[in-house]
């Protein structure tokens, strides 16, 4: 988001612009639901979701953020069982503004019994798989 400086001579105008800006910014933000943390190669990856709870056929945004350790080079996520085809693993997009990875995942139909939110974390030459429960 780009900061814009507004200069007005009328009293109260600056306050009105600030309130309007905050209202517009608030309308754009989404609330996240914390899912949990996973330990991966000395890193703690916090997992949250923005949107609907994963269920059969549902698309939702899963957010991965390294809260300890170095930033991963990449993260790929999926919902289901650990063993899936490589094509089912969706690359998350790094969001430099938030310092996290956003991953839009569509759950399989039917959603297999015992499904979780799985993700592969790549840091350098090391690739590690972790999971958290669906919430």
Image: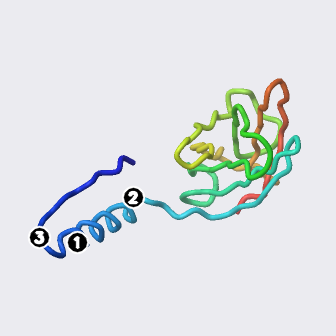
- Looking at the rendered structure, which numbered label has been put on residue 127? none
Dot 2 alpha-carbon crowd within 10 angstroms: few under 14, some 14 to 19, many 20 or more? few
Whether residue 81 sits left or right of residue 63 in the image: it is: right
Point out residue 89 in the picture as x, y percentages from the top left corner: 69, 34
Residue at the location (54% across, 58% down)? 51
Disc 1 secondary structure class: helix
- Looking at the rendered structure, which numbered label has been put on residue 16? 1
Residue at the location (62% across, 64% down)? 33
Whether pointer 1 and pointer 3 mark residues with C-beta atoms closer than 8 Å, the reply is no
How many numbered discs? Answer: 3
- Looking at the rendered structure, which numbered label has been put on residue 28? 2
Mark 2 or mark 1, earlier in chain: 1
- Alpha carbon separation for disc pair 2 and 1: 19 Å
Mark 1 or mark 3, earlier in chain: 3
Point out residue 23 in the picture as x, y percentages from the top left corner: 33, 68
User: Which residue is most to the top?
Assistant: 125
**Residue highlighted by disc 3:** 10
Point out residue 60 in the picture as x, y percentages from the top left corner: 57, 51
Viewer-nearest residue: 118 or 126? 126
- Alpha carbon separation for disc pair 1 and 3: 11 Å
Nearer to us of marks 1 and 3 is: 3
User: Which residue is most to the bottom?
Assistant: 12
Q: Is residue 4 above or below residue 101?
A: below
Whether residue 130 sits left or right of residue 8 in the image: it is: right
Mark 2 or mark 3, earlier in chain: 3
């Amino acid at each position: 988001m780009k900061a814009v400086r507004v200069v007005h001579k009328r009293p109260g105008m600056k306050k009105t612009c600030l309130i309007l800006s905050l209202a517009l910014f608030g309308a754009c933000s989404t609330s996240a639901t914390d899912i949990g943390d996973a330990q991966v190669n000395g890193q703690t990856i916090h997992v949250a979701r923005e949107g609907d709870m994963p269920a059969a056929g549902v698309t939702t945004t899963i957010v991965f953020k390294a809260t300890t350790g170095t930033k991963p080079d990449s993260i790929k996520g999926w919902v289901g069982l650990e063993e899936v085809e490589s094509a089912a693993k969706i690359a998350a997009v790094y969001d430099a503004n938030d310092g996290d990875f956003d991953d839009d995942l569509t759950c399989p139909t039917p959603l297999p019994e015992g499904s979780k939110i799985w993700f592969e974390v790549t840091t350098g030459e090391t690739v590690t798989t972790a999971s958290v429960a669906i919430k």
